Amino acid sequence: MSLEEFLYNLHFHIEKVQPPNFKVDWDDGPLPYKLYRGLPVFPLSSDVPLTLESKEPMHSKQPDTRQMGHFLWYVYGLTQLSQSVISLDSAGPALGTIQTFRRFVPSGGALYPSEVYVYLKVEDLPFGVYHYDAAHHRLVLLREGNFDAYLAQALGNHCDMSACFGSVFVSTMFWKNFFKYHNFAFRLQGLDAGVLIGQLLEVAKRFGFETGVHFRFLDRAVNHLLGLSEQEESVYAVIPLTVHPAAAWFADSADEAGKPVTAAELCRELTPIHSEHYVQSRRVREHPKLIKLNESSFLESIPLFQSSAGEREIDSVSHTVALPRVDRLSYDLALASRKRYSPGTNFIPGSISQFQLATLLHETMASFSYRSDLDEWNKNPKQRVLLYGCIHGVEDVPSGAYRYDSAMHALLQLRPGDHRDRLQQGMSLYNVNLFQVPVCLHIAGNRDSLLPVLGYRGYRIQQMEAGMLTQRLLLAASAIGLGGHPLLDFHTNTCDEIYKMASSEKTSLIQIPVGLYCPRPRLEGGLLG
């Protein structure tokens, strides 16, 4: 099976990428966090702020170690210990309990395959590259030194690292997802990295940091800097952090940098590091397809960046519903993050107002605007991921399948009627009763997954952007008192047909029912000092 065929089946025929006799060895699962051994550690302050209101960019003052500890905890720290009762259905007898560590971002199976690393130049810490040890809320020093020039070259000289106080690296550990989901892990990994990046960008705004997301970089050079084994882990995105205006650091300086450097040349500038870490599993099964796809996505050199593909023509519209004008939400991100909840079987019947729907959709798309190396200085980049939705139970909105047009702030009806039965039949696990939710949203993108422009790397970028938009949607829903539950166990072709996506060459990437809910009984404890 070719890699292109594999990605097609991963999206449209999941059964073809999974072995029929695959069984999960629950007794040999990995930890949901990475633990390094025998390296210098730097504890971070657990006295985190209880609120995160909107804040203007600093544009002057560099953060200290205390602020970075607060920032990292809100991005990816362990926030809650949860113990839930397992039963076949809500009315059935209890089968046992499950205990999980939770974070502010969702993750398939609470496995959290992403890891966070940081390059920091702040007070009270040696300059260098660190791993964020979420289990102990501390930094683990991997490599000491100033790596501004090295990292700038690894990013294609599109960022002046000397103007940044640091950079975040979001990686994926293949085994943490492969353990449960086998090859389907490749799709999940990009989404997990995306929701983490989405949370990071929102937290950065509250701390007054300026950010930019780099999806294209010299993979081997960045992995070499962190000392990662590419057979088990690889960086998916690099996010520089600064307090300076974008014009001072996020620039197209490639022409001024002379001959572009290759990954191999850059790696020779640093001595390899080999650090011991603990994953708990006694036997880590091979995952050759994930490794091959990852390596096929690598950039060995960075040519002139091309403008990436955006929105194509959309299907004909039968009816337009103009939504009421709403302002951007001003909400406490800390509170919305704590309240964010994936209801599952705990959605309850109930309608929502047109104003609530308008607020949800407007805030989701407005907050999604971000700076990246895909768009560079394009002030009006084309949208690569879009919002569709099947609506039934929203006042003054006829039941139907719609696309949300953020420019018009309107719902464009693609097919009238109640589509809940088809959506429910298209689910494989039936872990959500879609007849109880007024809005079932789908994030969609181009069917070619940016392959013509970015190769296999385009697939994971598309999944990451879908995850980034998902997190904005979940936070907006939480801020207005609703719950959203991201799902991948849906029949893609069914959803695409409902929205008549064939003519626009788009496809559904993730399904997110949104509605009222009643939290399930569970014992919770906040992990907050």
Image: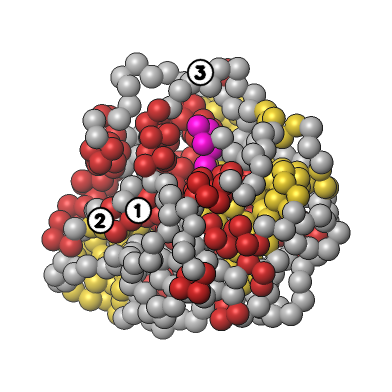
**Mark number, residue 423:** none
Which residue is more in the foreground, 430 or 387? Answer: 387
Examine the rendered structure and indicate whether residue 302 appears above or below residue 280: below
Locate residue 427 relative to residue 334 in the image: left or right.
Answer: left
Residue 148, located in which quarter of the rendered image?
bottom right
Q: Which residues are magenta?
A: 230-234
Examine the rendered structure and indicate whether residue 327 appears above or below residue 454: below
Label 1, label 2: how many angstroms apart (C-alpha)? 8 Å
Reading the image, the residue beneath label 3 is 25
Judging from the image, what secondary structure is the residue with disc 3 in?
A: loop
Examine the rendered structure and indicate whether residue 487 appears above or below residue 362: above
Q: In the image, what residue occupies the spot 72% across and 39% down? A: 135
Outermost residue on the right side: it is 124
Judging from the image, what secondary structure is the residue with disc 1 in?
A: helix
Residue 511 percent coordinates (x, y)? 36, 50
Q: Nearer the viewer, mark 2 or mark 3?
A: 2
Label 1, label 3: how many angstroms apart (C-alpha)? 32 Å
The type of residue carrying mark 3 is: Asp
Quick check: marks 1 and 2 in contact, CB under 8 Å? yes
**Mark number, residue 458:** 1
Characterize the magenta stretch by its predominant secondary structure.
loop
Label located before the other in sequence (1 or 2): 2
**Label 1: how many residues lie within 10 Å, few (<14), some (14-19) or many (20+)?**
many
Residue 167, located in which quarter of the rendered image?
bottom right
**The N terminus lies in quadrant:** top left
The type of residue carrying mark 2 is: Pro
Q: In the image, what residue occupies the spot 43% across and 49% down? A: 300
Reading the image, the residue beneath label 2 is 452
The type of residue carrying mark 1 is: Gly
